[in-house]
Amino acid sequence: MPTCGKCDSVFQYETNRVIQIHSANYGTIKWLLHVLVFSYVSFALVKDKLYQEKENVISSVHTKVKGIAAVTEEVTENGVKRIFDTADYTFPLQANSFFVMTNYLKTEGQVQGLCPEFPTPRTICSSDRSCKKGWMDPQSKGVQTGRCIQYKSTVKTCEVSAWCPIEAVEEAPRPALLESAENFTVLIKNNIDFPGHNYTTRNILPGFNISCTFNKTLNPQCPIFRLGDIFRETGDNFSDVAIKGGIMGIEIYWDCNLDKWFHHCRPKYSFRRLDDKTTNESLYPGYNFRYAKYYKESGIEKRTLIKVFGIRFDILVFGSGGKFDIIQLLVYIGSTLSYFGLATFFIDFLISTFSSQCCRTRVYPCCRCCEEWCGVNEYYHRKKCETVVEPSRRLKYVSFVDEPYIRKVDQQLLGESLQNTKGEVIQRPPVDFTELSRLPPSFQEPPSAPLQPGEMQLLGEEVPRSEGSPSWCQCGKCRPSQLSNKTSRCLEELCCRQRPGACITTSAAFQQLVLSRSSLQFLLLYQEPLLALETEEATSRLRHCAYRCYTGWRFGSREVADFAIVPSCCRWRIRTEFPRSEGHYSGFKSPC
Ligand code: GDP
Ligand code: ZN
Ligand code: ZN
């Protein structure tokens, strides 16, 4: 039962043909590269645990700062140093951050009222005209009343309605008032979760020693950090940062292996200064903010304004947890398979680079084995590559017997005779000469290979130009075209030679390869065993077969031969041998 064509195309399988090169060198290179790629792929698989399914950490952080500081500059009513405890110097902040005050500026007893601005170049005035009633400057502390009043005996400033007295514009005290905050400690509690892997843990394990202090080498798992140590880790000096404040990052990195056989899930702590320590002075360096404590005295609302300098600690928790997953492993293996093509790519590159003509001419003078190598590569390259030329009606191919290559000519660029058109040089396609042994005996006797310039000694001799040969003819045997169409005529204006010399039709090879009637008859009978050979039709077929023998001989591959032009001398020699009774010939027709 005949099967339908569509089903046929479904039930078929396409595969690539490969060329197996038996070479110890290339075999070694292939295995070396395979081993290299395999080692790398395996190393990356194990090192980065690429067989695991990874999940990012979800976490919560809780901090507790502890420590006491005594401030010498501030003395209480009892005449002792002011003590700062946790409630005084830590401030609740949002997210995973905490703040420790290290320095401050106090403006006490402020009440709502009218008073002169603190003198700065912006607020100093000489008369009421310099001040503007109702003027509010984002930099100033209140609304101007329009009057210019005495601030001190020598200085006058604009009067404002504000919290009076106005806060002085002052530098932060040096050294920092709470410099001893360096000895404060912070306990960080960090709980993490990998919901996808259903795994929860925390940085403080049961039974941990609460009197420990973190040390990168001696006690890297202790969750209690001395503030001064954190700054030492980043190469900063706590006392310097304490003056104007700063921002410090505490990084907690979790790289968890949740596989049973290699289970490991402990945090790694590291520190990073997050504010810009190289900032220019004028760009508000450090970290500070203001807050006020309000109270009533004799029924009047008052406040103490405090400008606080300190260090904000941001706790950054990141990392991932991975567990073996067969799909991840298969995806990884799939993605690395292409690396094994590296060997093919590299060896192909070597073969194509060191097989060209220039390899022989450039490398050969250096060493003898290089020449051999180029030759071997050239052989592999020939076996590997099949040259396919563009089957275009416009392109025509020309071969001169005194040139080793073929010329490709674009018909559209044909101005005058084909003989004088330069064209593009292309290599002659390689021919498997062993196939010629299958030809009948009359084909085998002469050297059947395309004649190379060196072998053409006989043909190289100068010959007298015959009377009727056209100007473009170099062999003296060509004839003018009998066609009327200009392009067809130009195409037929082609000699067998580029420079003057003997005609190819005078060679024994031409006689035997192109003109041998018995061989041509054999070829025709091979195709059509019952062909009547004595008819006019058969003579035409012999003629066409002779053209084909010529093009096949001189141009090799079928694709080129179909678009190759037979030189005028050969064309007419063939026509003389296998003539048409009325003597008119149609000439070359493009096959497609
Ligand atoms: P015809 O036999 O009277 O038609 O005239 P020709 O002796 O010129 O032969 C024409 C046939 O030979 C056509 O099929 C042409 O394609 C082919 N032919 C003629 N000249 C050339 C040529 O230069 N190159 C090629 N490849 N084929 C040719
Ligand atoms: Zn000629
Ligand atoms: Zn010729």
Image (cartoon, rainbow, N blue to C red):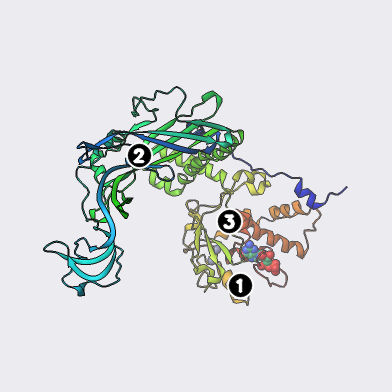
Is 423 left, or right, of 80 in this rendering? right
Q: Position of residue 32 (x, y in %)?
A: 48, 32
Confirm if mark 1 falls within 8 A of ligand 1. Answer: no
Is 233 left, or right, of 155 in this rendering? right
Q: Mark 2 points at which residue?
A: 87
Mark-to-mark CA distance, 1 and 3? 21 Å
| Dot label at residue 488 | 1
Q: How many labels sit on residues?
A: 3
Find the residue positioned furthest to the front. 298
Q: Mark 3 points at which residue?
A: 555
As shown in the figure, which amino acid type bears the numbered disc 3?
Phe
Helix, strand or loop for disc 1: helix
Q: Do the residues labelled 3 and 2 touch (CB within 8 Å)?
A: no
As shown in the figure, which amino acid type bears the numbered disc 1?
Ser
As shown in the figure, which amino acid type bears the numbered disc 2?
Ala
Q: Where is residue 529 in the image (x, y as percent from the top left)?
A: 79, 52
Mark-to-mark CA distance, 1 and 2? 106 Å
Q: Earlier in the sequence, mark 1 or mark 2?
A: 2
Q: Position of residue 242 (x, y in %)?
A: 26, 42
Query: Vertically, is 174 above or below 577?
Result: above
Q: Earlier in the sequence, mark 3 or mark 2?
A: 2
